[in-house]
Each structure stands twice: as C-alpha cells, then as structure tokens.
Amino acid sequence: MNWLDLTTACLGLAYILLEYRASIWMWAVGAVMQLLGIVLYYQKGLYADCGMEFYYLAMTAYGWWRWSRASSNSPSSQADANGNEALPPTGGVGEVPSHIPPRLALRWSLIFAVLWAVIWWLLSSFTDSTVPVADAFTTALSLVGIWALAHKFLEQWFVWIAVDVVTCWLYFQKGIPFKASLYGLYVIIAVAGYQKWRRAMAEAVK
C-alpha cells in the first residue's frame, strides 16, 4: 500500500498549494485524494479518518459549488469593456476571505467538543483502534475545518495547523511516513497561507 501513501501525499501537497492560492481547483484535486484516502486509511486501521473521507467528498462538492457561485457574483467575473468575460486569476474564486463571526465560532467549538467525545467513544467501543484519542481529535477538528474552508474564513488556517501537527505524529506512529512528512510541511504552508489570506483581506478594505 506504499503507492497509496506516496500518491495521496503528492495530491495533498498540490491541494494545500492550491488552497494557499485560494484556487477553486483544490476541490477537484481533493476529491481524488479523498477517494484514495478511503482505501489507505481503512488498510491502516484509521477508521475515523476513513469515515471522514466520505464527509470530505460531500464538503468538496459543496465547496466547489459555493466558490463557483462566489466567482459568478464577483466583479472580476463580469464582462469587460469589450464584452469579454474576465476570469479571476485564482481560477474561479471571487470573494475575499473573511473572519468567522464570534457566534459561529462558539457554536462550532461546541460542535467540535461533542464530535470529539462521540468519535472517541465509538472508536474505543467498536473498533480495534490503538489511537482513539488522537484519531478522534483530528477527525472532529477536520470536520469543522473543512466547513470553515468552504466558507473561506481566515481562521480555518488555525484549525488546520492544529490538525496537521497531531496528524504528523499520528501517521508516523501508524507507518505512513510519506503522508506524515507531508503534514509536517502542511504546518509551514498553513502559516504562510494564513499570512497571505490576511494580506488579501487588508488590501480589500483599502
């Protein structure tokens, strides 16, 4: 199964670089990565991660739809003076990142806590998982993170930094070295992505 580890790692790198650029094509790359991830995680006994990939596929479709709709409503996607449609340079995204409203932040923090507890209990009670706490943590937090990404909230980067740090350790423990190394790189790119998105927000209000 090493080819799956290497392939999903390469796709994951392409995914986060496209996310850094706020490119809509990240959703297409993500769909392929998630389909292969279902097989990889099941083979490695990471059952929560395996199940989460199905949720990711649904959110990928939602994210593609939402970002596409944003681009169609963006001034950059309207016709120019010659009547030609001008596509945004990011590949389809027209809206600027925004801060998550405090009300939603509190709501999703509570949802995360409940999800973590429930997934932890399910893994401990009904599977032979040897890492139920960490697996449940990254799964629950990722469920929140993909939602925040679909809505293009700046704070989604903080979620992914936490997920990436824990996942890097977890995958080394489970013998998935390529993806473990990738998640270490994710931390660096996530920090850079946060700074890039924050600059884009600052420039939008000038």
Image (spheres, rainbow, N blue to C red):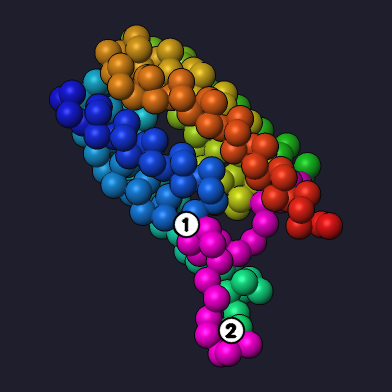
Q: CA distance from mark 2 to mark 1?
A: 20 Å
Q: Position of residue 37 (x, y in %)?
A: 28, 35
Looking at the magenta stretch, what is its main secondary structure?
Answer: loop
* For residue 177, side relative to residue 157 (left or right): left
Between disc 2 and disc 1, the foreground one is: 2
Tell me the kind of residue under disc 2: Ala
Asked if the magenta segment contains residue 34, the reply would be no
Q: Is residue 34 above or below residue 60?
A: above
Q: Residues within 10 Å of mark 2 (few under 14, many from 20)?
A: few
Total labels: the figure holds 2
Q: Which residue matches tag 2?
A: 79
Q: Position of residue 125 (x, y in %)?
A: 36, 17
Residue at image coords 51%, 19%: 165
Q: Earlier in the sequence, mark 2 or mark 1?
A: 1
Residue 192 or 4: which is nearer the viewer? Answer: 192
Tell me, for residue 91, which label it has, or none: none
Magenta stretch encompasses residue 89: yes
Q: Nearer the viewer, residue 97 or 42?
A: 97
Vertical placement of residue 175 versus 203, above or below:
above
Residue beneath label 1, please? 24
Q: Is residue 45 left or right of residue 98?
A: left
79 relative to 156, above or below: below
Q: Position of residue 169 (x, y in %)?
A: 43, 13
Q: Secondary structure at mark 2?
A: loop
